[in-house]
């Protein structure tokens, strides 16, 4: 594995290897000494050209627990805000001898572009509305731990699909692992061309959340991404919640053992009610701790072995 | 069905059983009993060996001995010169290793680098009262100042020779061969 740009680049074997290592990394969180020496002397730079709390801090802690030196660069306060091009910023950072580059950027395809400019291993930490592979891996890892296996299990992905890179990566990852996926959204937030893609990739689409929930083995709520919305995709927040929010009433449609996931940050009261987010079956905080283990595993697989 | 390994058999199943029985007694004698004892097997073949020693001790003393497994992958000094290694499980007995006598158990002692990695891993996991080393085969060629406390068999070997340990739990049969 040279880079992690898209879930599509990974074989099932590679995904399983990442999960296997993640399971070992998971234990480190409960130790007194939260440190493994595997990436000693390696340098990882987090380049975040878009806001992030959990992904950036998760990669930062993951790198540090593996003993790598981790540096954070964000668009605000870097030369990018002075008008430097992405290529120049990346080449400048890599000229300092960086081994791994974790990139988040608002342009779809930017991570792949960056990987063509540099020798360092590149991890896509979210490129526009395209992909967010480590999120999909950690979601699948969390669900696999909860459900045992994903083979034949039915996962509902609900919400703002048009603007969601998490949705795209998750569909790729979950179907790869044998899960049956149904995506649910209001017609205005269903991505263009989804019919052709769902037919090719083998997932289902629905506009009726109430019909899907009783048959789900897991449900994944996505954030309504207002910052990416230029037009009016739904009349009001209230109307969105009534049609597509996981409300207290809808919670009753789920079996009590069905994990509820949300990649965060949550808009409580919009796409997910507090009753659902804080329910015993909620996996939201598990996703965060699994995310750390999965990112440690990804960094380990990219940076620990010999140069490819 | 166990495949046959090439080369000369230096220990067969009965030799291995005798060696493990002797090591069980040695550990007990050295530790003056089975109290505060933890047997920590190193992946892959140290783990079943640690269980066998534990069974041996339990047979003599009539008390169960704590067994764990230790994976040293993250602590190896050759990670960068090999394809990415898969990690295995590290599992310590409940209560941890603080203040306990930890006996590391491995199949072959060679360069000593695995044991060096294991000592580093132990330091991150707690502070044992003492750490000792039990191995089935010591084939020499140490690259670090490390020696075993309990040895099943000293096996003089050329550096170029290959010593293979096969155990029933992993490989379907018990034997040590050199080729």
Image (spheres, rainbow, N blue to C red):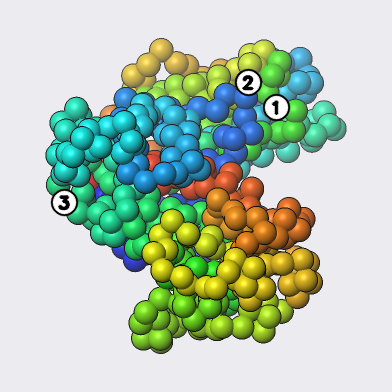
Q: Which residue is the site of mark 3?
A: A116
User: Does residue A127 appear anywhere in the picture?
Assistant: yes
In-front residue for pair A113/B138: A113
From the image, tell me which residue sits under label 1.
B96
* SS label for mark 2: loop
User: Mark 3 or 2, which is nearer the eye?
Assistant: 3
Q: Earlier in the sequence, mark 1 or mark 2?
A: 1
Q: Position of residue A287 (x, y in %)?
A: 58, 51
Label 2 marks a residue whose chain is B
Residue at image location 20% in from the left, 29% down from the top: A97
Q: Nearer the viewer, residue A29 or B164?
A: A29
Q: Quadrant of residue A8?
A: bottom left
Q: Depth check: B137 or A20 in front?
A: A20
Q: Position of residue A250 (x, y in %)?
A: 73, 72
SS label for mark 3: helix
Instruction: Give residue A105's mark.
Output: none
User: Which residue is depicted at the point 29% across and 60% down?
Assistant: A108
Q: CA distance from mark 3 to mark 2?
A: 44 Å
Q: Nearer the viewer, mark 3 or mark 1?
A: 3
Task: Give the residue at x 20% y 35%.
Answer: A82
Pointers 1 and 2 in contact (C-beta within 8 Å): yes
Q: Nearer the viewer, residue A115 or A212?
A: A212
Task: State how far apart marks 3 and 1 are (Cα).
Answer: 47 Å
Is A273 on the left-hand or right-hand side of A154?
right
Q: Gap between marks 1 and 2, in whole Å?
A: 7 Å
User: Can you identify the residue that label 2 sits on?
Assistant: B126
What is the count of numbered marks? 3
Looking at the rendering, which quadrant does residue B152 occupy?
top right
């Amino acid at each position: 594995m040279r880079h992690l740009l898209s879930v599509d680049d990974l074989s099932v074997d590679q995904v399983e290897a990442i999960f296997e290592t993640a399971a070992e990394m998971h234990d480190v969180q409960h130790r007194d000494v939260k440190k493994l020496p595997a990436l000693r002397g390696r340098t990882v730079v987090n380049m975040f050209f878009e806001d992030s709390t959990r992904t950036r801090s998760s990669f930062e802690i993951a790198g540090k627990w593996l003993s790598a030196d981790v540096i954070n660069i964000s668009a605000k306060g870097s030369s990018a805000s002075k008008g430097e091009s992405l290529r120049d910023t990346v080449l400048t950072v890599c000229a300092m001898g960086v081994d791994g580059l974790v990139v988040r950027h608002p342009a779809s395809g930017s991570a792949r572009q960056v990987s063509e400019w540099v020798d360092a291993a590149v991890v896509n930490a979210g490129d526009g509305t395209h992909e967010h592979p480590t999120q999909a891996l950690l979601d699948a890892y969390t669900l696999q731990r909860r459900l045992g296996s994903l083979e034949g299990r039915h996962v509902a992905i609900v919400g703002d699909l048009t603007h969601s890179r998490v949705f795209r990566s998750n569909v790729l990852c979950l179907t790869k692992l044998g899960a049956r996926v149904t995506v649910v959204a209001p017609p205005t937030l269903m991505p263009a061309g989804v019919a052709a893609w769902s037919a090719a990739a083998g997932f289902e689409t629905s506009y009726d959340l109430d019909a899907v929930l009783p048959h789900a083995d897991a449900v994944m709520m996505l954030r309504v991404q207002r910052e990416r919305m230029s037009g009016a995709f739904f009349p009001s927040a209230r109307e969105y919640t009534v049609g597509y929010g996981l409300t207290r009433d809808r919670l009753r449609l789920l079996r009590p053992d069905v994990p509820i996931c949300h990649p965060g940050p949550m808009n409580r009261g919009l796409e997910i009610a507090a009753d659902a987010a804080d329910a015993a079956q909620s996996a939201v905080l598990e996703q965060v701790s699994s995310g750390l283990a999965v990112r440690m595993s990804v960094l380990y697989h990219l940076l620990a072995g010999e140069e490819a | 069905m166990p495949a046959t390994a090439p080369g000369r058999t230096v220990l067969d199943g009965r030799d291995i059983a005798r060696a493990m029985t002797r090591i069980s007694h040695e550990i007990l004698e050295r530790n003056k009993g089975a109290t505060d004892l933890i047997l920590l097997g190193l992946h892959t073949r140290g783990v079943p060996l640690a269980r066998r020693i534990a069974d041996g001790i339990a047979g003599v003393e009539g008390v169960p001995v704590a067994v764990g497994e230790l994976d040293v992958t993250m602590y190896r000094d050759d990670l960068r010169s090999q394809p990415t290694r898969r990690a295995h499980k590290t599992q310590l007995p409940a209560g941890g290793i603080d203040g306990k006598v930890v006996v590391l158990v491995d199949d072959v002692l060679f360069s000593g680098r695995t044991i060096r990695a294991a000592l580093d891993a132990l330091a991150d996991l707690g502070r044992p009262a003492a750490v000792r080393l039990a191995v089935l085969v010591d084939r020499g060629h140490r690259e670090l100042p490390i020696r075993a406390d309990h040895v099943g068999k000293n096996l003089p070997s050329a550096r170029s020779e290959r010593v293979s340990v096969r155990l029933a739990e992993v490989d379907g049969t018990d034997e040590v061969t050199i080729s």
